Amino acid sequence: MAQEKKKTLKITQTGSPIRRDKTQRATLVGLGLNKLRRSVEVQDTPEVRGQVRKVQHLVSVEE
C-alpha cells in the first residue's frame, strides 16, 4: 500500500476573543489557539471544519 499524504490546514488567529461567547473562546482553545497571530497545523477533518466555521470571523485558513 502506498502511503497517503494526510491533508492539513494551517489556521491563524486573526481576531481577539474579547467580548465573544464562551463557546467561541472554547473553540479557539480546542483548535490550539490562544493569542493573536498564533498558527497551528491540524488535520483536515469534518470536525475541525465545523470548529473553523464557528469562529470563521476570528481565524484565517490556508490549505
Image (spheres, grey):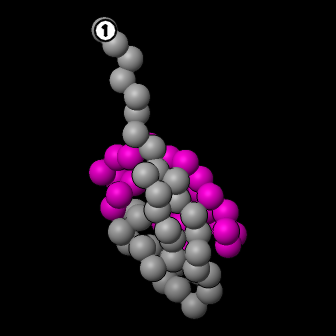
The quadrant of the rendering that contains the N terminus is top left
Residue that extends furthest to the bottom in the rendered view of this protein: 19
Find disc 1 in the rendering and name its residue.
Answer: 1
Q: Position of residue 10 (x, y in %)?
A: 52, 53
Local crowd size for mark 1, using a 10 Å CA cut-off: few (<14), some (14–19), many (≥20): few
Q: Magenta segment, which residues? A: 24-50
Query: Which SS class for mark 1?
Result: loop
Picture residue at 54% right of the left edge, 74% below the top: 25
Identify the residue shown where x is 67% and y is 72%.
Answer: 36
Residue ranking furthest to the front? 63
The reply to whether residue 15 is visible in this rendering is yes
Q: Residue at x 46, y 62 (%)?
A: 61
Total count of labels: 1
Q: Is residue 23 left or right of residue 47?
A: right
Q: Up-down: is 31 above or below 42?
A: below
Give the amino acid type for the residue marked by disc 1 in the picture: Met
Q: Is residue 43 magenta?
A: yes
Is residue 23 shown to the viewer in this render? Answer: no
Instruction: Measuring from the top left, give residue 3's x and y in whole percent.
Output: 38, 17
Task: State the residue lying farthest toward the top.
Answer: 1
> In the figure, 63 relative to 20: above or below?
above
Q: Give the quadrant of residue 49.
A: bottom left
Residue 40 forms part of the magenta stretch: yes
Q: Is residue 41 above or below residue 11?
A: above
Q: Is 52 or 37 nearer to us in this picture?
A: 37
